[in-house]
Image (tube, rainbow, N blue to C red):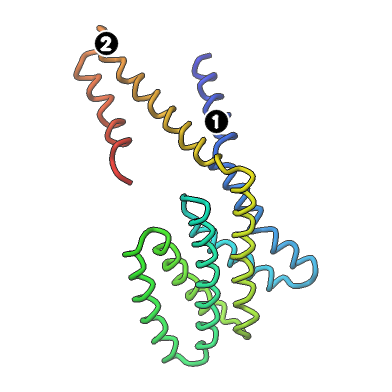
């Protein structure tokens, strides 16, 4: 009975957790433009916009609200720029090769300036690969849905953080409290005379290391 109660508590925490909410929010934001544009006969434009929304959402790292919105807007413009330039250069293999070398070097160097710019650089390279694979006929018709998708995700994120500004913080605090309770429960084994001290150390050290090691 206690096992079922524990499993139910874990399942209920998952349903109320940040991960499920973010998954539902990102899925709905990505799929919405595809459905809307497909309903008016512009499926290709909707797919391009959904692609831009998806790639920009992957650059959305935790942080202050202003910084998140700033980097999301920057990521939208960067992905659109890469899509536009790559689509223009498609007819020339030599120009594509030059762009690949330049973009790979330049965007890889962004890793030196933090996780946000590193994510934007990595997704920009993925955008270049998508553009080469899709081979759009018109560069502008391909680039503007990419930028629009990124701005659409930025607006949705801005609205979400405005109405629920402390949700991420509350989730982080709750996860910290759960992890601390698990650690203290294992720590209590040291005061149990029926549990050998070596077994108590063996049980607590892996959990302690997993919570103190840098990510």
Q: Residue at x 42, y 66 (%)?
A: 122
Q: Position of residue 142 (x, y in %)?
A: 62, 78
Residue furthest to the right in view is 40
**Callout 2 crowding tier (Cα within 10 Å): few <14, some 14–19, many ≥20:** few
Q: Secondary structure at mark 1?
A: helix
Image vertical order of residue 79 relative to residue 17, above or below: below
Compared across the picture, whether 43 is left or right of 199 comes to right
Relative side of 2 to 147, left or right: left
Q: Quadrant of residue 203?
A: top left
Identify the residue position indicated by label 2 in the image.
191
Q: What is the quadrant of residue 18 in the picture?
A: top right
Q: Is residue 184 above or below residue 101?
A: above
Mark 1, other Cα within 10 Å: few <14 / some 14–19 / many ≥20: some
Q: Disc 1 marks which residue?
A: 13
The residue furthest left is 198
Assess whether mark 2 and mark 1 are in contact (beta carbons under 8 angstroms): no
Judged left or right of residue 212, residue 124 is right
Please report the residue visible at 30 percent of the width from the left and 19 percent of the height from the top. Answer: 187
Residue at 53% across, 14% down: 1
Labels in figure, total: 2
Residue at image position (48%, 60%) is 59
**Image position, residue 106 (x, y; %):** 36, 75
Q: Looking at the picture, how far across and down is residue 41, in whole percent?
A: 78, 72
Please say if 81 is above or below 122.
Answer: below
The residues tagged by marks 1 and 2 sit, at their Cα atoms, a distance apart of: 30 Å
Secondary structure beneath dot 2 equals helix
Q: Label for residue 55?
A: none
Q: Residue extending furthest front?
A: 66
Along the polypeptide, which appears first: circle 1 or circle 2? Answer: 1
- Up the image or down, 135 lies above or below 109; here it is below
Using the rendered view, name the quadrant where residue 139 is placed: bottom right
- Percent of width and height locating residue 157: 60, 54
């Amino acid at each position: 009975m206690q096992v079922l109660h524990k499993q139910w508590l874990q399942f209920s925490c998952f349903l109320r957790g940040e991960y499920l909410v973010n998954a539902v929010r990102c899925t709905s934001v990505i799929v919405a433009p595809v459905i809307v544009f497909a309903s008016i006969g512009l499926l290709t434009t909707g797919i391009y916009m959904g692609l831009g929304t998806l790639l920009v959402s992957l650059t959305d790292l935790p942080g202050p609200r202003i910084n998140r919105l700033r980097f999301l807007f920057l990521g939208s413009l960067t992905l659109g720029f890469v899509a536009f330039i790559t689509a223009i250069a498609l007819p020339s293999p030599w120009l594509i090769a030059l762009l690949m070398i330049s973009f790979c070097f330049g965007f890889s160097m962004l890793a030196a300036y933090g996780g946000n710019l590193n994510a934007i650089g990595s997704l920009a390279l993925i955008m270049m690969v998508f553009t080469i694979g899709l081979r759009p006929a018109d560069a502008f018709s391909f680039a503007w849905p990419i930028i629009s998708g990124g701005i659409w995700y930025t607006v949705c994120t801005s609205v979400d953080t405005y109405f629920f500004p402390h949700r991420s913080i509350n989730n982080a605090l709750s996860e910290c409290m759960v992890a601390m309770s698990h650690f203290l429960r294992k720590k209590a084994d040291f005061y149990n005379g029926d549990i050998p001290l070596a077994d108590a150390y063996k049980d607590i050290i892996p959990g302690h290391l997993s919570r103190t090691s840098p990510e």
